[in-house]
Amino acid sequence: MQTSWVVVTDSTRARIFEKKGATQPLNEFEDLYHPSAYQSQNELEHHTRGRFHHPGTFHSHTDDPSVSPLAHQNDLFAKSIALYLDKGRKDAKYHRLYLISSPHFLGILRNKLGKEVNRLIENEWSQELSDMSAEEVEKFLREKTVWH
């Protein structure tokens, strides 16, 4: 039996569902939250500014990061999802992958996925469904996909 994983995500949350055959229901088994996504922009900036000291002087200053703190946090969350999916692939927990993500985050996530995980992607949709119930996600997929 071929198992499919469905990842429904945005930049703050990734829900992972499993379908163990065309006639089986979609089952949510993992809900990953990104804790930094709930920090204010001010808090994120405070943690990401670098402090520099000029050698031979008593002067130091802070420097603005070259990447926005929010973009950096999105990259970190996408990387953690990619690592989770790669581990699942290595452990042979799924054979097909379906991605549903908010438009902006889908591109970030795709850039973090390895070649082996990319080969397992059956389809992807650029839509915001992360707050939908498992039944609503399954209904969306039934309209878009033929399960194997």
Image (tube, grey):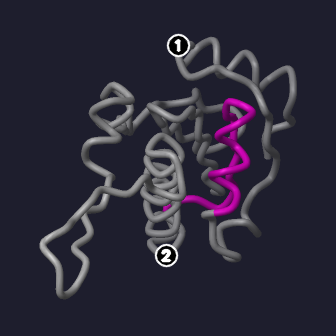
Q: Secondary structure at mark 2?
A: helix
Q: Amino acid at mark 1?
A: Ser
Residue 81 image point, x, y percent: 48, 53
Q: Secondary structure at mark 1?
A: loop
Q: Residue at x 48, y 40 (%)?
A: 70
Q: Residue at x 68, y 62 (%)?
A: 111
Q: State the residue in front, 106 or 120.
A: 106
Magenta residues, as a range? 93-111
Instruction: Give the numbered dot on residue 39.
Output: none
Where on the picture, by quarter, is residue 106? top right
Q: State the residue in front, 19 or 120.
A: 120
Residue of label 2: 90
Residue 132 image point, x, y percent: 57, 13
Residue 109 image point, x, y percent: 63, 52
Residue 50 image point, x, y percent: 30, 61
Would residue 54 be counted in the magenta stretch?
no
Q: Is residue 54 left or right of residue 115?
A: left
Would residue 108 be counted in the magenta stretch?
yes
Instruction: Please identify the quadrant where the N terminus is shown.
Output: bottom right
Q: State the residue in front, 74 or 123.
A: 74
Q: Amino acid at mark 2?
A: Lys
Q: Residue at x 63, y 49 (%)?
A: 4
Looking at this view, name the residue that lies furthest to the front: 57
Q: Residue at x 27, y 33 (%)?
A: 43
Q: Is residue 141 left or right of residue 23?
A: right
Residue of label 1: 133
